[in-house]
Image (spheres, grey):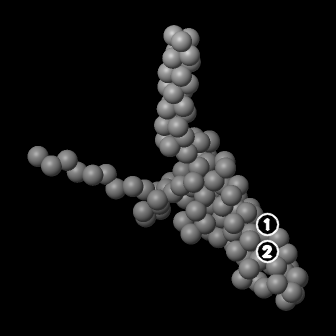
Amino acid sequence: MMRNSLFVCTTAALLTLVGSSVSWADDTGFITIHELRREGRLYCTSSHTHVGTGTVQRTKRRATRSAAREWSEFTTWEYGSDWGRWRNARGKTVSCTGRRGAITCTVEARPCKVLRKRRRRRR
């Protein structure tokens, strides 16, 4: 009985640690290998870009979205979700090939992260 209680407590403690680490460990830290700079309300890589190539789509709009999704997924995997938001990326380029009904696009951009405002302490 004592052994079962110890097992349950240990398992609960481990699950708590794992669960809490996931919430704060989203930013992988790999972004720090690149030179970063502030651009207004964003923190961006200075020159390092990521590329995303989408799947074949019927329209240019869909093909661009597919490529941006690929860019976002890889960037999120490598640096964390704050860096993987396509809408925050800078230096975006889009190139597409094919014709209506069979279009493929490739996007390229520098990852950026929104700077959070610090809360002021009330005195």
The relative height of residue 96 versus residue 50 in the rendered view (above or below) is below
Q: Nearer the viewer, residue 27 or 11?
A: 11
- Which amino acid type corresponds to the residue marked 2 in the rendered image? Cys
**Image spot of residue 80 (x, y percent):** 59, 49
Residue under the point 79% across and 69% down: 54
- Which amino acid type corresponds to the residue marked 1 in the rendered image? Thr
Which labelled disc corresponds to residue 53? Answer: 1
- The answer to whether residue 36 of the structure is visible from this angle is yes
- Name which quarter of the figure residue 92 lies in: bottom right
- The single residue placed furthest to the bottom in the displayed view is 100
Marks 1 and 2: CB-CB under 8 Å?
yes
**Image spot of residue 23 (x, y percent):** 50, 43
Cα–Cα gap, marks 1 and 2 = 6 Å
Residue under the point 39% across and 55% down: 116
Which labelled disc corresponds to residue 63? Answer: none
Helix, strand or loop under label 1: strand
Residue under the point 51% across and 27% down: 12
Looking at marks 1 and 2 on the same chain, the residue that comes earlier in the sequence is marked by 1
The relative height of residue 87 versus residue 9 in the rendered view (above or below) is below
- The answer to whether residue 44 of the structure is visible from this angle is no
- 119 relative to 105 in the view: left or right: left
Which labelled disc corresponds to residue 105? Answer: 2
Q: How packed is label 1: few (under 14 Cα within 10 Å), some, or many (20 or more)? A: many
- 61 relative to 1 in the view: left or right: right
Q: Nearer the viewer, residue 6 or 97?
A: 6
Helix, strand or loop under label 2: strand
- 121 relative to 7 in the view: left or right: left
